[in-house]
Image (spheres, helix red, strand yellow):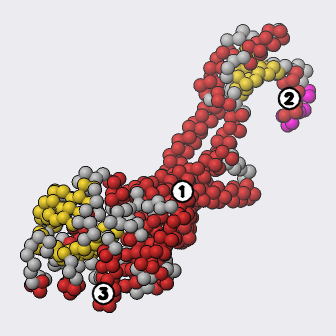
Amino acid sequence: MNLVIREALLAFRRAPLLSALSVTTIAFSLFVVGLFGLVAVNLQQALRDVAERVEIVAYLLPGAPIETITLAEKDIEAFPEVQAAAYVSEDEALQRARTELVEFRDVLQELERNPLPASIEVKLKPHFRDVEHVNEVAERLRGFGFVDDVRFGRDWVEKLDRLRQIAAAVGLVVGAAFAAVAIIIIGTTIRMAVLQRSREIAIMRLVGATNGFVRRPFLLQGALKGMLGGLAAVALSYGAYALINRWLIHAEFFSQEQAVAIVGFGMLIGFFGSAASVGRHLRRV
Amino acid sequence: MIKFTNVFKAFPKGGLALKDVSFHIAKGEFVFLTGHSGAGKSTVLKLVYAEEPVTSGEVRVSGFTLAEARRKDIPMLRRRLGIVFQDFRLLEDRTAEENVAFALEVTGARRASIPARVMRVLTQVGLAAKAHAYPRELSGGEQQRVAIARALVNEPTVLLADEPTGNLDERATRGVFQLLRDINASGTAVVMATHDLDLVRQAPYRVIELQEGALVYDSAVDEPRDQAASP
Ligand SMILES: Nc1ncnc2c1ncn2[C@@H]1O[C@H](COP(=O)(O)OP(=O)(O)OP(=O)(O)O)[C@@H](O)[C@H]1O
Ligand SMILES: [Mg+2]
């Protein structure tokens, strides 16, 4: 094992240029994947922020007894889709309108009678903020006798849904394409490293080294290069993130798990790329 | 030790390289393999170290029957052989010492034992003083000695040499040949493919001659003959 590690490390010293090239190639390939990941992460976050605003409002008939409403509020809160339900009385509605609609303050001040109905505002749990569930909950709310009307901005929720679908599809396709390109580029780099050492491999086999023995330093080396490349990619992505955050828009960086996943992905590509290259080489000679 | 029985070898692209070759080489023997270029000398050696599969017939080497040997047996077979080529096949980025040690390292020798074993074979081939030299700093003859040291360090029962003096001048040739004779004298069998008939004549060793893939003369079996008549 000792020797395997030494041989794997020696490769960096014996072929510093090629090793640096491999690591750089892996780093930039993963960096592109990482940049795309950043876009995806931020898009998701943006969509989540927008989805925060998905809300169903049930307007109540005037004169519904408050006890009934309180009970109903409890029932609604017990719906599996519902995160919170809040009763807004007529007075509160007016109060709110006064603070929020500053332009109409004068008009609202002069009202003799409050035209605004009381309502129950229902917020759904994050997973249920799509058209289907919103519709379902709205339908159930309509079933309450004291509910006059239910509003939730159908168009808007539908658009959000479509946006989410598009984001997911583009994310999948583009992400897979980038990952595939990264795998191919990294595979080629590793193949070069194997070819560069084909003479050494031939001699190892000639003096009776087993295939497993020949393979091991390459696997370790591939995993190592992949890891270094992954770390560099995360660092580059962080640099890009910091620049964007500072000069363009407020953005989010990867979570720790996501950063670890990028490094792990690099390691896996390095490992399996080496395994494939060496395996193919050994089968042919 | 090495036994060929009715061996045929056909390459996928190309005709029959060996036709019905049979011979037996005993422990500790020194055998010249001669013949024109393309006669099949290298092919015989390749079959011995399992670089190429046998097409038909049987090759037995040091207890292995090659047709039956699985791919994973090949390393074990090669550890009992030492192999030397015309072009030395040293690693340019390692010193003489490291080249020799390489053969021990990659076959899982105990690390602590490596330096002493390497020095012993380097001394045996007369290169102890140049242990730290890189191949480019050595003459052809010296490089071949390093290659021989590498072949010997695993203490093989047979040394296979494919035109080991092919790239050397006369003086270096004599030196390397003498080294092979010394190695043989200490008990290792040597099979040496060569064009150099002067060398063959110099020594009283067994000669196996191939012609277009067929064994046409074996001094252990056939009548002695005037060697000047052979090519
Ligand atoms: N890998 C191969 N594929 C196809 N034909 C081959 C292959 N290797 C050798 N041959 C053929 O087999 C025959 C014997 O070749 P071999 O190398 O054994 O000759 P040789 O006696 O060693 O010649 P030389 O003295 O030139 O080294 C030749 O006709 C050669 O063309
Ligand atoms: Mg030959």
| Pointers 1 and 2 within a single chain | yes
Which numbered circle lies on residue A1? Answer: 1
Callout 2, which amino acid? Answer: Arg
Quarter residue B145 falls in:
bottom left
Q: Which residue shows up at 82% across the image and 21% down it?
A: A88
As drawn, is B229 to the left or to the right of A274?
left
Q: Which residue shows up at 69% across the image and 27% down it?
A: A125
As measured in the structure, the alpha-carbon distance from the residue carrying label 2 to the one carrying label 3 is 108 Å
Quadrant where the image shows the C terminus of chain A: bottom left
* Image spot of residue B57 (x, y percent): 16, 57
Mark 3 lies on residue: B174
Magenta span: helix, strand or loop, mainly? helix
In the image, farthest residue toward the front = B186
Mark 2 lies on residue: A96
The residue stretch that appears in magenta: A101-110
How many numbered circles are shown?
3
* Image spot of residue A54 (x, y percent): 70, 31
Of the residues tagged 1 and 3, which is closer to the observer? Answer: 3
Quarter residue B124 falls in:
bottom left
Of the residues tagged 1 and 2, which is closer to the observer? Answer: 1
As measured in the structure, the alpha-carbon distance from the residue carrying label 1 to the one carrying label 3 is 42 Å
Residue A28 lies in the magenta stretch:
no
